[in-house]
Image (tube, rainbow, N blue to C red):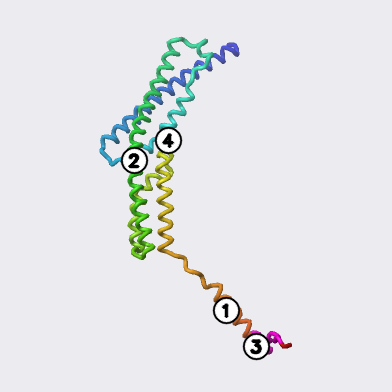
Amino acid sequence: MSERDNHLQLRISEFYSLRKEIDIAISQANTHLDNLENIIKSNYSTLKEYNLIRSYVPDIKNIENELYKCIVTNNDYLIMQESALIEFNNAKTSCESLLDDWWHVFNVIRNEADELLYTQLDELNDSIDTLIVKIRSGDCNKPDLAILYDKGKNVTEYISNDPYLSSKIKQSQFKWSTAYAEAYRLLNPVQPSNTSTVSYAAVSNNAFKKTTGSHAVTMPPSSSD
């Protein structure tokens, strides 16, 4: 068999290997759609539902990456049967459609979670602003801030390191974090340190004792000298 024939056989083998990869991708996409349906049927809260669904995003992206590698080259049209090429392209299109369906449902649920999180963050920001006013007037203590912190933690745990939520969520979270830090600072003021004063006094004292122990104290010259 010539080198050209070897090359053709290798490409034909690769072509059908890619075709099998598409079948695997279709199977995986269907499984994820089934998982999606099961999550929705479970009637979880919006945020828990979103949290579960977004955990599958890396798998979906991995399927997309593998599917992206399944391409038909110009040479394939010269060496492969037309029916095989049509089947290949149809299968890939079918898989892409399944993935599009998954992303569509994900985006719907993400938008619902986005709106809910924004509403809750907005309420938190109003509460922390009110709390800061009370702190400044002396009408608030640390337990009040701790209660608000727990409420904020329940919301922000859904936001941390999530690249899929809207920019308004991130802006609102930043506002909350900044205001909380300010409230904490007001309730925990840093006391001026007297370490340097004490150290200076101790050093001066020791120096005085050492000097007067064996020598007379040297006084500064008077202005008349």
- Up-down: is 21 above or below 147? above
Q: Give x and y (percent) for residue 213.
A: 65, 88
Q: Give x and y (percent) for residue 23.
A: 40, 22
Considering the numbered disc 1 on the image, is that residue within a helix, a strand or a loop? helix
Please state which amino acid type lies under the numbered disc 3. Thr
In this orientation, does residue 201 appear?
yes
The part of the chain drawn in magenta is: 210-223
Image quarter hosting the N terminus: top right
| Residue on which disc 3 sits | 212
Report the residue at 34% width, 54% height from top: 127
Please state which amino acid type lies under the numbered disc 4. Pro
Considering the numbered disc 3 on the image, is that residue within a helix, a strand or a loop? helix
Disc 4 versus disc 1: nearer the observer: 1
| Residue on which disc 2 sits | 115
Disc 1 versus disc 3: nearer the observer: 1
Task: Indicate which disc residue 58 carries.
Answer: 4
- Mark 4 or mark 1: whose residue is earlier in sequence: 4
